[in-house]
Amino acid sequence: MKQYAGYDLHTHSTASDGALAPAALVRAAYEAGVRQLALTDHDTLAGLDEAAREASGYEDMQFYPGVELTCIWRGRVIHLLGVGIDPQAPVFVDYMKELRCLRAARAEKIAERLVKKGLPDILEAARKIAGSGQIGRPHFAQALIDKGVVTTAQQAFDLWLGAGKAGDVKAEWPSLEEAVHLVKSASGYALVAHPTKYNMTFTRLRELMDAVIQAGGDGLEVSYPGVTPNHLRDLLNLADRKSLLVSAGSDFHSPAQRWTALGRFSAFTSSRHLLSCL
């Protein structure tokens, strides 16, 4: 079984909640020794063109367009990676237009609720921070920091944006089945991201993967920051038993987060690696 090296199939840029612009992320990945890279921003394809252009400047780098879709399974939020997608697929273009409208309406509700609590109107500031990406609560958190209302993003969520707080406006997300359909309709591979981070038992995780298989999905991420050696082994065994593809990535967001450095995650061997299909 082949052990792949120098790759990262789960990363984020400023198009969603990352710290580096797409081109800067590609450069940082190359400098870190990554030669096969996927950009998988949360619920947006906005950074893919820039990243692909930058990656094309390196003869020995392979770039895979991707996305990390938020979806719902049995009332629980799940993140689904779509890797190797066609960003121009009509189904994705239409979905992203709809999602932008939904996120814009949600942003207005968040801003209204915060103003009613006596905070300054930070909607335009949050929009500027989001740029071309999908606006969300992390952008409001940064706007609150910039306005001097709070000093950290954690404080912003603890006081104003977290669960049960004034700015906790629920987003509308597709079902797991709909998310898988989106990825497959765009010729991509659909895999559950960081499966041990959902606080579910392995019995429930097996049920989740059965639902992914039934929906036409492909597999799961098995190596990522925070996964234990035992869980990595169990995830690989699960993939073997259910004939699923496996993937890995750093879930990179920022150079300041050393535990999510580009290309850094536990090595493993598998005959079912996603890279063998891309």
Image (cartoon, rainbow, N blue to C red):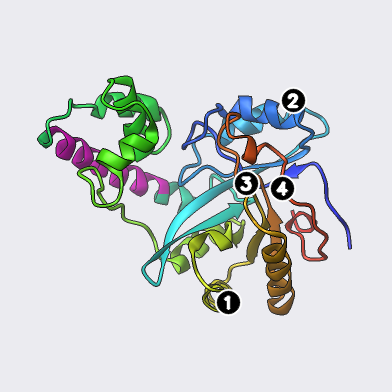
Q: Amino acid at mark 4?
A: Phe
In the visual, does 251 lie left or right of 180?
A: right
Pointer 2 local density, CA inside 10 Å: few below 14, some 14–19, many at least 20: few
Spatial CA distance of label 3 from label 2 is: 21 Å
Spatial CA distance of label 3 from label 4 is: 11 Å
Spatial CA distance of label 2 from label 1 is: 41 Å
Secondary structure under tag 4 reads: loop
Residue 55 image-quadrant placement: top right
Observer able to see residue 145: yes
Secondary structure under tag 3 reads: loop
Give the foreground label among 2 and 1. 1
Q: Which residues are magenta?
A: 96-115
Pointer 3 local density, CA inside 10 Å: few below 14, some 14–19, many at least 20: many
Q: Amino acid at mark 3?
A: His
The answer to whether residue 196 is above or below residue 102 is below
Disc 3 marks which residue? 10
Residue drawn 81% across and 63% down? 270
Q: Amino acid at mark 2?
A: Gly
Residue drawn 65% across and 28% down? 53
Q: Position of residue 191 (x, y in %)?
A: 60, 61
Disc 4 marks which residue? 265
Spatial CA distance of label 1 from label 3 is: 22 Å
Q: Amino acid at mark 1?
A: Arg
Q: Are marks 1 and 3 in contact (CB under 8 Å)?
A: no
Principal SS element in the magenta part?
helix
Q: Which mark is residue 206?
A: 1
Q: Which is more toward the observer, 39 or 52?
A: 39
Q: Position of residue 86 (x, y in %)?
A: 59, 48
**Nearer the N terminus, badge 3 or badge 4?**
3
Q: Which is more toward the observer, 226 or 50?
A: 226
Disc 2 marks which residue? 57
